[in-house]
């Protein structure tokens, strides 16, 4: 039997999805699993997008241009203009989700062995795209004690080597929900400019900011126009994760040309998803007002609830729909698995993503979990109740003597 | 400005799409371009698939399982059983087109620097996926003189080195339309077995076989069950190229596990496309009978027509909907560009894919072009008329003294 490649062996399983078999087993036992592990909102997709499918009048579902429908790209350029981002449709390559934009971008920008600095904890799948491109992720540590703010410039400078070729940020952040200020972004701009790095800015949660906060796009940073790459997606904006439509955006024409060749190889982004995404550009503002208000309430219920549990710390984020909580436990992988295998409260349990997958060194995330507040408020209240009780019962809770929990991994 | 990666620079532009700007310019001049360059059929997508979109009753367009909807995978397993291919739904990973199946498969199977043997001419984008995975393509030459049959086993043996890790075939073939016999496939099986290679079989044109020929799947070859990978796609089968739904299929559980990690990183294949593809499984056989009959007539019109042009050779293929023709020209890139820039016949011209992009060494394909017979019969007759006249007028036709055509590249 021929062997699996090094990449194939080393590619990390998704920390968001690796516990799925345990969740499936729990469901088979009749336990209701509250899914806070994945950023799959229950929010309805805008009617205009679904209507575009209902009224689809094409006879042949053809490939689109490799960069996406021109009409959709022109619509996107207008959408960005409304958000203070100036781009032309020729600076946009429509991708199969933000995932593909990251993969193509890393392959077009970096040599195998190049290093990319990412504030951690970071979206776990960045590891996967980096591994596919042969790029080394160099984490710069953010601390839960200051809500995962950007580390000082000196922390970045200390990590820069001759192989450093880029910085990747997610703003608002997955998994922390942290929203970078303009000042923080200008710090990043200065580092990017000083070392002529690429700046990848994953801004797919742009719409979801709370408490009057407004997001600042990396595309508005002056002096690094040829260095900045905006990664975007319709997945969260329109609660349309399954459309698999994203975008790779830059003013750098040479880079656009290189990424287009990767895009040509896979022929086109999804046609159905593009039709729905183009229609979704007409989503009324009232939709976003309602959704943002709902997420804010969910955040408050979940985060405030978590902070009432003894030993739990959870900063209140200003964006996205995730939070990272520190728990009084021995091991988040073991705890999350135990919740699915050995715990239930009135027939319910909670599924979370162990934060071990969100740090370059899994050990750093051993006491943390990521929770996505993508479910109804009642579910979130129930989740908090479950967690409160679970932490009382879990054998690996640190107030009690540590038992065989770590051996059960 | 930071630099583009070596991969980004070396990634080949699509030979199928690289002339698009010249086609767009021709259209702006009012010339009607007959698109034989790309396998984008004008055949209607099955009603059942479009109806599934019209009747879509989901409120949220969610991610699917990273391996695709279980119900769709079960339906696919039944479809394969009807085609003599025995697989379970757990041996199927739904991908974003056949393209992604090839990319993930190459990354999971091969180390950078490994070699993969591909009978040439071959689908140009194999170069791109190989480059993305860092794999070296080693071509084994097929000859137009015997209709692009599989070369003898000795030709393969001569190319095998310690770095050879796989063989990739397309059957029925793009660009040649060649359909491998069971005997030819057993020859391949013997090489694969003797050297413990992976065998990638791209069988996306399975339905399109003519003159009573039936396709033989690599999945039916005995003794290499752990080596064989079936790459599939709904793009051509249901004339639904834009759905971007394919499949990675193997009995090799370790490999499935590795590919699933790549699949998890990109979260899920397109949900809309999967819904349409699952519905398309109910496409009536009468649809395929009509489509195959239509393609056969188109093939006969195009191939028979081409062979009446002085100096043109075109084997009549038994499968897919492409043919490769040898033309009495200096340079197929120059000729195809000239057709768009400098030629028209009663307001029409023809766009073809220069075969230079379908050979590892472009020089080998300098006198050949690929034509896709994906348009109505009248268009194909018109295309033959255009080509007959064009070859009389083109300055680089070899019956005439070669002029400055090559300089115009």
Image (spheres, coloured by chain):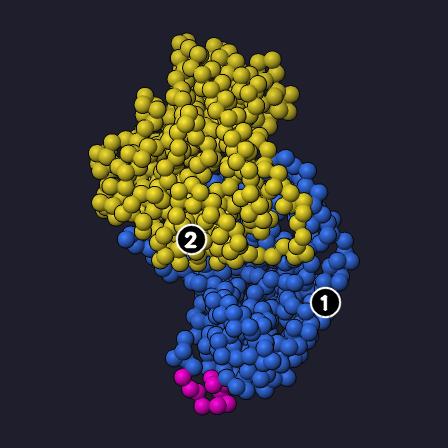
Chain colours: A blue, B yellow
**Residue A38 point in image, percent of width and height:** 56, 65
Secondary structure state at the residue bearing disc 1: helix
| Mark-to-mark CA distance, 2 and 1 | 42 Å
Please name the residue that numbered disc 2 is placed on. Answer: B88
Q: Give me the residue at 50% from left, 84% from top.
A: A394
Host chain of mark 1: A
Q: Give me the residue at 52% from left, 45% from top.
A: B245
**Residue A84 point in image, percent of width and height:** 70, 53
The C terminus of chain A: image quadrant: bottom left
Asked whether the viewer can see residue A22, the reply is yes
Is residue A248 or residue A301 the one in the foreground? A301
Residue B164 falls left or right of residue A184:
left
Please name the residue that numbered disc 1 is placed on. Answer: A294
Q: Give me the residue at 60% from left, 35% from top.
A: A60
Residue B187 falls left or right of residue A185:
left
Host chain of mark 2: B
Is residue A403 part of the magenta span, yes or no? Answer: yes
Residue B383 falls left or right of residue A360:
right
Q: Is residue B225 above or below residue B237?
A: below
Q: Which residues are magenta?
A: A395-404
Asked whether the viewer can see residue A281, the reply is no
**Residue B226 point in image, percent of width and height:** 31, 51
């Amino acid at each position: 039997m021929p062997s699996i490649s090094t990449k194939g062996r080393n590619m990390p399983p998704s920390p968001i999805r690796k516990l799925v078999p345990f969740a499936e087993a729990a469901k088979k036992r009749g336990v209701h699993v509250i899914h806070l592990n994945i950023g799959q909102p229950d929010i309805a997709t805008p009617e205009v997008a679904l209507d575009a499918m209902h009224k689809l009048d094409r006879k042949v579902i053809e490939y689109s241009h490799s960069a996406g429908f021109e009409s959709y790209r022109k619509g996107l350029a207008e959408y960005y203009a409304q958000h203070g981002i100036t781009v032309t449709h020729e600076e946009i390559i429509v991708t199969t989700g933000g995932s593909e934009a990251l993969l193509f971008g890393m392959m077009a920008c970096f040599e195998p062995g190049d290093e990319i600095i990412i504030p951690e904890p970071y979206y776990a799948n960045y590891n996967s795209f980096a591994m596919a491109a042969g790029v080394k992720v160099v984490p710069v540590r953010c601390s839960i004690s200051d809500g995962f703010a950007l580390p000082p410039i000196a922390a970045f400078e200390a990590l820069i080597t001759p192989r450093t070729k880029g910085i990747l940020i997610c703003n608002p952040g997955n998994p922390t929900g942290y929203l970078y200020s303009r000042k923080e972004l200008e710090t990043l701009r200065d580092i990017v400019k000083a070392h002529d790095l690429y700046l990848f800015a994953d801004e797919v949660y742009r719409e979801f900011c709370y408490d009057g906060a407004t997001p600042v796009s990396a595309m508005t940073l002056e002096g690094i126009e040829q260095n900045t790459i905006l990664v975007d997606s319709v997945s969260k904006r329109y609660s349309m994760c399954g459309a698999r439509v994203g975008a790779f955006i830059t003013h750098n024409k040479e880079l656009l040309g290189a990424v287009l060749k990767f895009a040509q190889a896979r022929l086109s982004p999804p046609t159905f998803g593009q039709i729905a995404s183009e229609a979704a550009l007409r989503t009324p503002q009232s939709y976003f007002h309602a959704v943002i208000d709902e997420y804010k309430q969910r955040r408050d219920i979940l985060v405030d609830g978590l902070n009432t549990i003894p030993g739990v710390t959870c900063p209140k984020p200003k964006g996205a729909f995730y939070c990272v909580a520190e728990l009084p436990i021995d091991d988040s992988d073991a705890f999350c698995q135990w919740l699915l295998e050995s715990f239930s409260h009135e027939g319910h349990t909670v599924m979370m993503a162990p934060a071990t997958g969100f740090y370059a060194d899994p050990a750093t995330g051993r006491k943390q979990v990521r929770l996505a507040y993508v479910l109804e408020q009642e579910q979130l209240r129930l989740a908090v109740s479950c967690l409160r009780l679970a932490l009382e019962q879990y054998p690996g809770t640190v107030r009690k003597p540590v038992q065989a929990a770590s051996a059960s991994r």
